[in-house]
Image (spheres, rainbow, N blue to C red):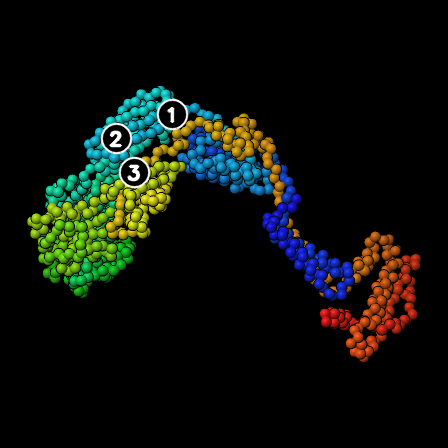
Amino acid sequence: MLTFEQPLLLLLLVPIGILVYLTWKRMSLPYPRKQRWLILGCRLLLFTCVILALAGTAWAMPVTRQATVFVGDISASTGPQRTFIEQWITSAIKHKHTDDQVGIVAVGRNALVEQSLQSATIDFARFESTPDTNYTDLAAGLRLASAILPSDSQRHIVLLTDGQQNMEDALQEAQLLQQQGIRLDIVPLPSVSSEDVRVDSFDAPNNLHTNEHFNLHTRIYSSVAQNATARIYLDSTVIAQQKLTLVSGEQEISFNMLAPAVGFHTFRITLEAPKDSITQNDEAAAFVNVQGPPKILVIEGQPGSGHNIVTALQSTHINVTVGTPGDVPTTLDGLVPYSSVILADVPAVALGNTRMQILQSFVRDLGHGLVVSGGQNSYGVGGYTDTPLEQTLPVRMDIPQHKETPSIAVVLIVESLEQQVQINISKEAAKGVIGLLTPRDQVGISAGYGTLSIKMQHVTDKSAITKAIDNMNPLDPQSYNPDLANAEQELLHTDAKIKHIILLGDGDAYDNYAPQVTKLASENITVSTVETNAMSNEDLATMQNIAQWGKGRFYRADNASIIPQILLKETQRAAKRSLINENFNPAVVGNHPILTGIDGLPTLSGYVATTPKPAAQMVLVSHLDDPVLAVWQYGLGRVVAWTSDDLGLWTKNWIAWDNAPKWWANLVTWTLPAANDGGMNINGKVTNGTGQLTVDLPPGTTAGGGQQQVQVHIIGPDLSQQSVNLQPTAPERWEGSFPAEQVGGYLLQVTWQGANKNESRLTATTGMVVPYSPEYYNQGTDLRFLRLLAQTGAGTLLSLNDTGSAFSQNLIPTNASIPMAFWFLILAALLLPIDIAARRLASLEFIPEGYKWLLARFGIGRTPQLATATRSPSVASLNSIRDRRARQRSQPVPQPVENKVKASTTTQPEKIEPRRTTAMPAPVNGKAAAPKQPAPTTSTAPAGPSTTSQLVAAKRRRIQEKK
């Protein structure tokens, strides 16, 4: 039976056949009748072959070989039956026929090919594939199995499962399988009874108030009566533990609790029971939002450095908590209760990189506030350069280029520590100094050789200098005097205003250093020492004396962790270039909510010079146009940079100002996150490992039109972060989804941004809990669903003990298609030269005569004697045919009357001598007879006109007929 990939192309046979026939009909060349029919037949057959090839013609033949794919459900719910699945498939493969093909697919949340389809012996003992077992997607397994089944076999899928699907719908996939001619048989897994206890639900009120009493409700299921222990967690701390007596079946239990501090919190319950086969379903969680007055965390760099801010805020009834840099939580959950954080003259080294990253996420991702107040230990002098804190602030630590600041030249003398330590403290200290210098500064490094190992240069490429320090091989010198003398000469040849030497070593080089170091001090070159790994008091005394004689400072650093603090203090003299100690009246750049109700700003006597970032908004500037108060929106939160202090160093007049409490209250409250901004309604649910979110905006919110956006920033249980843009689905309703594969609480920060980005903005914070997977909830085999699934797939439920039934089912008949397009193209290519020859040759009579001659020549169909005897007559007959045709051509062709005169003047054709042939007589007694010479004959018939003449005459006749 023929099949066609593009059957509509066969319709071309009709117009092309008609066109070929009409063209053939109008042909006027003098071909013989048989040759004309040959031309028509070749042309029709050639085009037919081409069209059949284009239509994708194939020959469909029935096949009996079978292709079977076993799909094993190895999700968490079938864990106890996994061995049964592997043994059943192994046993069933033994019953396959020689030419049958077998493949194996493993399915959980996703589907993976365990064994590709093959007819050879399959070596399968257990599943090596590792799909995600937290969910069951039977549709994915059936879809993958059908994709690897070949089309030239009877196709069969055997699914081994308990029927507990929780993703997609396998029934729809089974319908598609039936439509594709694939039979689906199912092996229902045997039920396994096990003792288990689980938490079916855990609920808490969404919104609470401080010190409010409420109940936590939980529903617990136990397969047997037993005792258990329940523990209640608030965030990560156990707050209650209770012994429970469980009955067989479900029961509800309530726990009376007191609302925690303001903010978002996670309550979690865990169960512990002796008869429990599945531990993944022994816990659940719930989110609560405790509302109350805003809570502010004030971090003081030194005790009392934030006293004036705290006093001002408390006078406006703002809840304030005071702490040290070490009190900043190292997790984001710990900062959630606070609406804003204030850093009062806090150096970066006191916070550490981890806490600065938490503060950055606190503002950017949660939408909370941050206020940074200046002082002699903040901003540039506080080491904020290239830290997460600088990224969060609206200003950079670069010194403004509007004024001439003194440049610095530093020579670092680094010696070997004579110990095999993982971290070379002296090298790390040298790299710390490089990080505090600017491109206007110069640095040279000596390694104890009496010369500079790294030449004096401007600090324009810090990474290259740092790399050179790492590659340096310091020496343990006998004396520091050669290095000190060389450093003196290098510094004297620089034009730097401040010249400094820092000696980093263990102090075991004994010598008379007083003359050389005293000379350096007289030349305004200061010398400081950083002692590392001193072995004796004499070593310490050496380093202390050098610092004393050099009018510098002595530091002891036996571990790398305190080096940044030492270098911060040591370079403070140089960094004081950024401290501006001048009286000025701050100028107001533009109106801002912070200035509401504020008139007549007092004078300031100083600040820390910084450079504003392009997106920052300047509120107050100094007489040098440097930022004094700069603000900006950073991610979802707001940040304020106050570059003057709050302790009174530069703000004595400010502290005595009557509006000081209002000033600090305005400054801090501007950074507070909005409290749900008019009541956005946020609903979330989890389906098949995907979180579905619906946000309903307050009525009239979207009336302004324009380019609006609703974005949700999501923080997962492991603190991973992602952002999702919701799409409008109805008036003032936005929806979206996000992957929610982790079990636990998700913090959701929802932001609506109107067309006017400066004013139209709503934010809300809520939470959503993802429970444990339903794989750990549903147990047993769902036979009702499996019967329906097998019926939909035109199959049946197979016996648990009859593994041979996998290859004994009556499968849907299948035909294997053999493509014939190539052979039709080959036939068309062979017909093409025949078609050309039939149209180009005047006669094809030589073909049958030649065929007869070949038969005679090779003796086909005759005896050898007869073939030999008739050889000469056949040649003679060919000559006679030629002579007869020559005589026919010599006869005159009838001409029209008007051409008779011309015809009469036609010259007579020349006589043609007949071709002589010699007949070979038959052999006599096996010997060839002598040839006979025939008598010469002369033909008197005149030669006829040539073929060209006939064509010209025929054309003339057609012209006359048209006239």
Question: Callout 2 environment at 10 Å: few (<14), some (14 to 19), or many (20+)?
Answer: few
Q: Quadrant of residue 906?
A: bottom right
Residue 944 is left or right of residue 775, and the answer is right
Residue 306 is left or right of residue 209, and the answer is left
Q: Residue at x 63, y 37 (%)?
A: 64
In the image, residue 843 lies at what x, y percent? Answer: 77, 64
Contact, mark 1 vs mark 2 (Cβ under 8 Å)? no
Note whether 218 is above or below 645 in the view shown. Answer: above
Three-letter amino acid code of the residue under disc 1:
Asp
> Which badge, 1 or 2, comes first in the chain's sequence?
1
According to the picture, the residue beneath numbered tag 3 turns out to be 767
In the image, residue 193 lies at what x, y percent? Answer: 43, 24
Residue 839 is left or right of residue 651, and the answer is right
Q: Residue at x 61, y 39 (%)?
A: 814
According to the picture, the residue beneath numbered tag 1 turns out to be 196
Quadrant containing the N terminus is top right
Q: Quadrant of residue 338?
A: top left
Q: Secondary structure at mark 2?
A: strand
Residue 44 is left or right of residue 764, and the answer is right
Q: Secondary structure at mark 3?
A: strand
